[in-house]
Amino acid sequence: MNLSDDGPLRIATLDPGERTQLAELARALPGDEDARVDDERWIAAVRDAWEDAPAGLRRALREFRRHSGQAGTLLVRGLPVADDVGDTPSVAGSVERKATVSASVLMLIAHGLGDPGAYRPEKTGALVQNVVPVPGQENLQANSGSVHLTYHIENAFHPHRPDFVMLLCVRPDHEGIAELRTCCTRQVIPKLSEEAKTNLLTPQFRTDPPPSFSDLQSGNHDATSHAVLTGDPDDPNLCYDEAATTPLTEAGVEATKELNDLFQSSFNAIRMRAGELAIVDNHVTVHGRSAFTPRYDGRDRWLQRTYVLANLRDSRGNRPGDGYVMGT
Ligand SMILES: O=C(O)CCC(=O)C(=O)O
Ligand SMILES: [Fe+2]
């Protein structure tokens, strides 16, 4: 395992031996027809197998879990994804239910940070979701779009939002220009004016569900006002989605303008290649994506996404039968 930094971004690169070890672990998981990534028995096998994952990778995740660094982002390079992945899906709500190499790698790594988790109203509650451009949805502020995707905390409106968002690149975009962009509070707090900081620490904002929560769009979501920054003002948590958070006051409008400008001038740009995984600390780091041009030819950009819950017990009341999927 090679650990390096690209500015504030932390990078962990598997060596070929570790890559092979992880690929073998993924392939040794139950792989018959019943091996569905959402099946609790299969997940139990993954949890057990994770203990045999390369020690260097387990260490890097343990460190990141303790403190996610200046960029709140860890880029893991050199992960195995099969060569014969097939065409990039192009339908809305596409998910991966089969235990493919990439899906298995995501589910394995989730156990280095906590447990996997999902939300029933979003992508049918699948634990591994395809992030792909969908014809007709180009302009949507969702991961199926291909215009610039604005900065957001994943599922910012949700009381049990994910602790970590994992995005694994199965196939890059044709031109290799699509950038996953992340920006951490630790990169912007020192540059924020005292006035904006005070206002962001004040509950004067409302956040609605994103378009991916289709069932909740009809106004049956009870949004209370909240602060954008909470906790220690020197290292606060962040709850913000540029497209879904509404400032309820003029001061709030000014403060979010300043925050957006700082995200725009301080972000980490990640042009992911196949086998690269970005792990985002969803408590302190927003993410977004630059625009790119899909061709819908089966070779478009394809990421797979899995959410991680660091403390599964916290959301027990939302997870029927102690499963991995929240009911709402
Ligand atoms: O397409 C990307 O790089 C990120 C999309 C996104 O925000 C997500 O899938 O949560
Ligand atoms: Fe996102």
Image: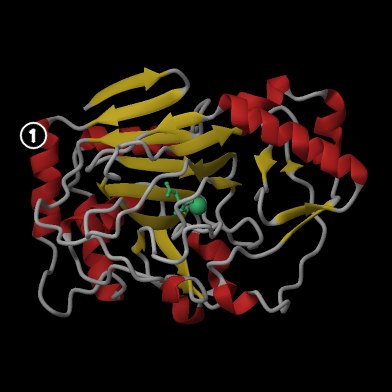
For the residue carrying disc 1, how many other residues have a C-alpha within 10 Å: few (<14), some (14-19), or many (20+)? few
Quadrant where the C terminus is found in the figure: bottom right
Residue placed at 26% from the left, 44% from the top? 174
At which x and y percent is residue 237? 66, 41
Whether the residue under disc 1 has CB within 8 Å of ligand 1: no
At which x and y percent is residue 149? 53, 48
Relative vertical location of residue 61 with respect to residue 71 in this rendering, above or below: below
At which x and y percent is residue 279? 41, 42
- In this figure, which colouring scheme has been used for the structure? secondary structure
Residue placed at 39% from the left, 49% from the top? 166
Q: How many marks?
A: 1
* Residue to which mark 1 is pinned: 17
Relative vertical location of residue 208 with respect to residue 124 in this rendering, above or below: above
Q: Amino acid at mark 1?
A: Gly
Residue placed at 63% from the left, 63% from the top? 158
Q: Is residue 258 visible?
A: yes
At which x and y percent is residue 90? 32, 66
Decide which of 120, 253 is in the foreground and name it.
253
Q: Quadrant of residue 151?
A: top right
Relative vertical location of residue 208 with respect to residue 267 in this rendering, above or below: below
Q: Is residue 111 visible?
A: no
Relative vertical location of residue 18 with respect to residue 35 in this rendering, above or below: above
Q: Quadrant of residue 224?
A: bottom right
Q: Horizontal placement of 111 versus 267: left or right?
A: left
Quadrant where the N terminus is found in the figure: top left
Q: Mark 1 falls on what kind of element?
A: helix
Q: Horizontal placement of 3 versus 125: left or right?
A: left
